[in-house]
């Protein structure tokens, strides 16, 4: 099975591999509040389990050198139905991009380093880690976070990729009363970030831009030490927060991107409204033009590794996505997340599992966006 490539970016120490280890442990078991589980190749799951065991051990934290290399992890998203059948609709291929490749002046001098940067430039999905401690200092006026991010912002600005900024250690920021909107507003006070943001949101060829608060270990697992830099474990069981949200957003943002591009290409679609009314209008028109959109989507497969990875179930899943979203916008009797998880458990084929997954993910993200205003950045009007 081919996979959807996702490139993980962030300065060294931003928590990339810790996040992926936590994501794996959260999704290694099918849970009622999630609805699906992930499978990794044995050597990858063993390695992430080892990293996670060091993270949650009472003494110390993992050796930073263990996390400093570039690795790839294949997360196959699966569902075990009520009848015991297992269906695996899609796989995400995470490239955990070593921080040194971002900051070293000689990073692209090697064949491997140059190949990694090509992957960044060609990627359809970028996952950018913002260390929560550095975000807290930024909120207090320390601009070093932005300085570290300049190479990342340059890469994202040159890309057409869907981009998810993950604000880690959200439990600490939440405890201080901070919100996603407040974090974004503070970042926008920096001229470099402001100019990146304005240019990125102005473009019509870019995918979604999200700011997603996550905590790999959850509330109370570790607190900030007296020095204001060291995290001190408190002997509690880890309860990760929102770690599965970026994974769910990949399919939703992939389909939304294609819908938006089809709008740009489809000359028979009249000019629509701007900003807050754009998406309800767009999905209403899309529901009326599904045969045309399915054809456009199928034609785009050859130019998109992400679409190619799900091409067998793509057209019907896209139809389910558009239909269910349009029902929600029209305030019809759309199913809630609990009902959609129950439907997923009743899937009788890989196609049904894919259809149920995309509608479930879209519903969960709608609830998440309502709880965290500002997490999904709509295209700005220039």
Image (cartoon, grey):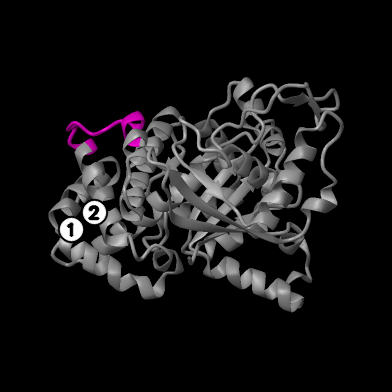
Kind of element beneath mark 1: helix
Q: Is residue 2 rendered to the left or right of residue 349?
A: right
Q: Residue at x 32, y 40 (%)?
A: 346
- Please name the residue that numbered disc 2 is placed on: 319
Q: Which mark is residue 290?
A: 1
Whether residue 89 is visible: yes
Please check the rendered image and state whether residue 336 is part of the magenta-colored stretch, yes or no. yes
Whether residue 209 is visible: no
Residue 90, given in percent of the width and then of the height, sits at 45, 56
Mark 1 nearby-residue class (10 Å; few <14, some 14–19, many ≥20): some
Of residues 122 and 176, which is closer to you in this image?
A: 122
Quadrant in the picture for residue 313: bottom left
Mark 2 nearby-residue class (10 Å; few <14, some 14–19, many ≥20): some
Quadrant in the picture for residue 178: top right
Kind of element beneath mark 2: helix
Q: Is residue 283 above or below residue 228?
A: below
Q: Residue at x 59, y 37 (%)?
A: 26
Residue 267, given in percent of the width and then of the height, sits at 17, 67
Q: Is residue 177 rendered to the left or right of residue 201?
A: right
Q: Which mark is residue 318?
A: none
Of residues 236 and 304, which is closer to you in this image?
A: 236
Q: CA distance from mark 2 to mark 1?
A: 7 Å
Q: Is residue 187 rendered to the left or right of residue 237?
A: left
- Of the numbered discs 2 and 1, the one sitting upstream in the chain is 1
**Residues tagged 2 and 1 counted as in contact (Cβ below 8 A):** yes
Quadrant in the picture for residue 277: top left
Q: Which residues are magenta?
A: 328-340
Q: Is residue 171 above or below residue 306?
A: above
Please check the rendered image and state whether residue 311 is part of the magenta-colored stretch, yes or no. no
Q: Residue at x 80, y 39 (%)?
A: 54
Q: Nearer the viewer, mark 2 or mark 1?
A: 2
Q: Residue at x 39, y 65 (%)?
A: 307
């Amino acid at each position: 099975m081919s996979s959807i490539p996702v490139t993980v970016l962030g300065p060294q120490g931003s928590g990339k591999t810790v996040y992926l280890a936590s994501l794996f442990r959260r999704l290694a078991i099918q849970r009622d509040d999630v609805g699906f589980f992930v499978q990794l190749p044995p050597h990858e799951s063993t390695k992430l389990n080892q990293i996670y065991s060091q993270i949650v051990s009472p003494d110390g934290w993992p050796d930073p050198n263990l996390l400093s290399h570039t690795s790839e992890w294949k997360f196959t998203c699966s569902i075990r139905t009520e009848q015991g059948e297992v269906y695996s609709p899609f796989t995400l291929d995470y490239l955990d991009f070593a921080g040194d490749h971002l900051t070293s002046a000689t990073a692209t001098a090697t064949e491997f380093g140059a190949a990694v940067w090509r992957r960044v430039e060609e990627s359809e999905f970028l996952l950018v880690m913002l260390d929560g401690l550095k975000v807290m200092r930024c909120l207090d006026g320390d601009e070093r976070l932005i300085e570290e991010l300049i190479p990342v912002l340059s890469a994202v600005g040159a890309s057409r990729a869907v981009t998810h900024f993950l604000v880690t250690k959200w439990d600490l920021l939440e405890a201080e009363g901070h919100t996603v909107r407040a974090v974004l507003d503070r970042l926008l006070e920096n001229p470099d970030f402001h100019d990146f943001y304005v240019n990125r949101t102005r473009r019509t060829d870019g995918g979604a831009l999200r700011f997603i608060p996550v905590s790999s270990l959850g509330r109370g697992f570790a607190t900030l030490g007296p020095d204001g830099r060291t995290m001190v474990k408190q002997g509690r069981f880890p309860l990760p927060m929102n770690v599965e949200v970026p994974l769910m957003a990949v399919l939703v943002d992939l389909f939304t991107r294609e819908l938006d591009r089809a709008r740009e290409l489809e000359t028979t679609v009249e000019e629509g409204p701007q900003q807050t009314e754009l998406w309800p209008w767009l999905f209403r028109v899309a529901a009326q033009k599904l045969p045309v959109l399915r054809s456009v989507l199928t034609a785009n497969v050859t130019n998109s590794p992400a679409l190619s990875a799900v091409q067998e179930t793509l057209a019907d899943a896209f139809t389910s996505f558009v239909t269910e979203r349009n029902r929600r916008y029209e305030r019809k009797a759309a199913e809630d997340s609990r009902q959609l998880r129950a439907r997923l458990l009743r899937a009788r084929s890989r196609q049904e599992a894919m259809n149920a997954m995309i509608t479930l993910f879209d519903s969960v993200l709608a609830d998440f966006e309502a709880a965290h205003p500002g997490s999904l950045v709509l295209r700005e009007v220039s």
